[in-house]
Amino acid sequence: MTDLTTTILDRIRDVPDYPQAGVVFKDITPLLGDHVAFCAVIDALADELAVDKVVGIEARGFILAAPVAYRAGAGFVPVRKKGKLPAETLEASYDLEYGSAVIEVHRDAFSPGDRVLIVDDVLATGGTAQATVELVSRAGAHVVGVSVLMELAFLKGRDRLPDVDVRALVAV
């Protein structure tokens, strides 16, 4: 186990039965509150990728993606829940481990051919990431990868992204 893996796992708290019975929520707030650990995570997620835009998926993805965009010298694009963006949007529906949802991105968020990194906190069933890849592609940009803090490998979310470079700092 690497030092970074240990640092991350030591600072993620399991919250049983949240947001509903049977789900074990991975709380990253202890990691976010540790300046050294947070900086190490941001540096690892940015990892010298050449990108034009970094997409953050609402809501915890914003916390990680915005500083990754800064670190990478790229623009930040939020992907939000339906109805939260003020201009014309593209939308995609998806299923997640405990329900379904719709996400949106501004129709003009990308220039044709933009190289885009998608960043989120957790890759679970892969539905959110798959829908985000679809949105970025429909907007005319190119997804260079999906980077996440943690992958819940037992949910096989990576399988829904067969043509995408998926990188997780830790897998549980």
Image: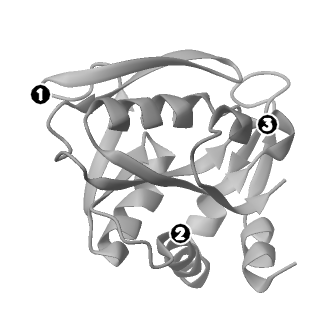
Residue matched to label 3 = 156
Label 2 vs label 1: CA separation?
Answer: 29 Å
Residue matched to label 2 = 45
Of the residues shown, which amino acid type is indicated by label 1?
Ala
Q: Quadrant of residue 94?
A: top right
Q: Are marks 2 and 1 in contact (CB under 8 Å)?
A: no
Side of 119 relative to 73 (left or right): right
Q: Residue at x 65, y 64 (%)?
A: 30
Side of 144 relative to 19 (left or right): left
Mark 3 / mark 2, whichever is N-terminal: 2
**Residue 82 locus on image (x, y percent):** 34, 20
- For label 2, the crowd category at 10 Å Cα-Cα, with few meaning under 14, some 14 to 19 and many 20 or more, is many
Indicate whether 32 appears above or below 26: below
On-image quarter of the N terminus: bottom right
Label 1 vs label 3: CA separation?
Answer: 34 Å
Indicate whether 154 appears above or below 27: above
Mark 1 / mark 3, whichever is N-terminal: 1
Side of 145 relative to 83 (left or right): right
Viewer-proximal residue among 30 and 141 = 141
- Name the mark on residue 151: none
Viewer-proximal residue among 157 and 84 = 157
Of the residues shown, which amino acid type is indicated by label 3?
Lys
Determine whether the residue tagged by mark 3 lies in a helix, strand or loop: loop
**Residue 99 locus on image (x, y percent):** 63, 15
Label 3 vs label 2: CA separation?
Answer: 21 Å
Indicate whether 72 appears above or below 147: below
